[in-house]
Image (cartoon, helix red, strand yellow):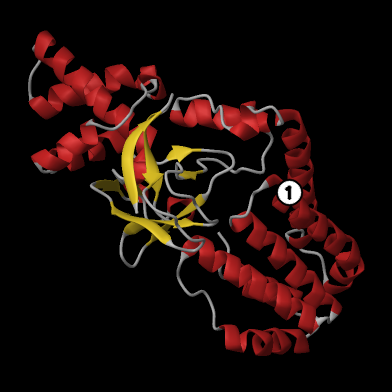
Amino acid sequence: MYEIRPSPGKGLGVFSTRSIKRGECIMTDKAILSHTKDEQQRCWFVALRANFDRLSREDKDEYQALFYDFGLVDERLYPVVRHFMSLYLNTEDDLLLHLELMGFLKIMAIFLTNNAAMGFDAENGQGIFPKYSRLNHSCLPNATWTYNPETERMDVYAHQDIAVDEEITISYVDPITPSSVRMEKCQKGFGFACDCVACEGSEHEIRETRRQRIFDLYSLIESDIEGNLDFDELLQSADENLDRASEYIALLQDEGIVGVELAEGYEFCAFFHAIKGDYDEASSFGEKALENRRACRGYRLADEEGLEEDLEENGEDHEDSHGWWEWLCCFRG
């Protein structure tokens, strides 16, 4: 289905070897090295050294072959790491410590450049997935990644049809944020400047204006939903937010952003139609949201046959607006 080969200006990349349909699983990859969330929040490089030393020679070679940027390692850590290495190796030999330090700084840089969050907010930790790490970034990606805690694997799905010999890309950052934000996160977080069609193409200014509007619409809708408004306030804002959500969906489609962001637009519509008591419309948009999420994430998120019944049951208590949102949020993010 795919092969890893040189990508012009990007080192290695992942390319399709046949046509891939929307919703197909492209890749499922197991971490060769990982940290728990607690280890990452504490002295993470201590856990990194211990975990790296436990790898097989083959896994070490695969790890060390990954792209890295030394600039991601905070220079203020150098003396701390050197002291740790002297204790770890039980030596004060300057030459040996220098050599070992440079080798370990590379290991740290590889981790910082390539680690992926295992679950929402890295709840299951962070890991190095060697094949997944070869997927290059685009602010207009054709695939979506998701961590499956049951299999402990990183899965990648095509959220749109992919032609044979096309590069398979994911987004390392939130694609609806302004280009200045995306650029900064790519540079500071991954050590590269994005030059995808959304950032450097001939239509950059048009795309940027459109994405700014997408981001503004999203922020306005989210602020109303997350603002703990009571039912009457949500009902009062429903028509305005439905207009916003409809524009949000249309602009996403115009921009070619058809991953989970599009599902969120359908979820917004389902929520506010439900608030208005339009349960048929809520059901219709809820089904669209679920279908889109499944295309991006692969697994079955809810029973389609019970969707309308669930919506109607939630709608019986008109004051329970948060119940609606909890139902729709159960498969977000």
Residue 65 seen in the current view? yes
Of 231 and 42, nearer the camera is 231
Q: Quadrant of residue 1?
A: bottom left
Quadrant (top left/top right/bottom left/bottom right) for the C terminus = bottom right
- Image location of residue 111, percent across then percent down: 32, 35
Residue 128 seen in the current view? no
In-image side of 36 versus 302 (left or right): left
Of 65 and 17, nearer the camera is 17
Residue at the image position 66 percent from the left and 43 percent from the top: 176
Identify whether 253 is placed above or below 272. Answer: above
- Image location of residue 162, percent across then percent down: 49, 52
Of 186 and 313, nearer the camera is 186
In-image side of 279 versus 31 (left or right): right
Within-10-Å neighbours for mark 1: few <14, some 14–19, many 20+ = few
Q: Quadrant of residue 133?
A: top left
Q: Mark 1 highlights which residue? A: 254
SS class, disc 1 = helix
- Image location of residue 75, percent across then percent down: 37, 17
Badge 1 amino acid: Asp
Identify whether 135 is placed above or below 108. Answer: below
Residue at the image position 60 percent from the left and 88 percent from the top: 306
Identify whether 136 is placed above or below 301. Answer: above
- Image location of residue 66, percent across then percent down: 28, 32
Residue at the image position 48 percent from the left and 50 percent from the top: 163
Identify whether 306 is placed above or below 255. Answer: below
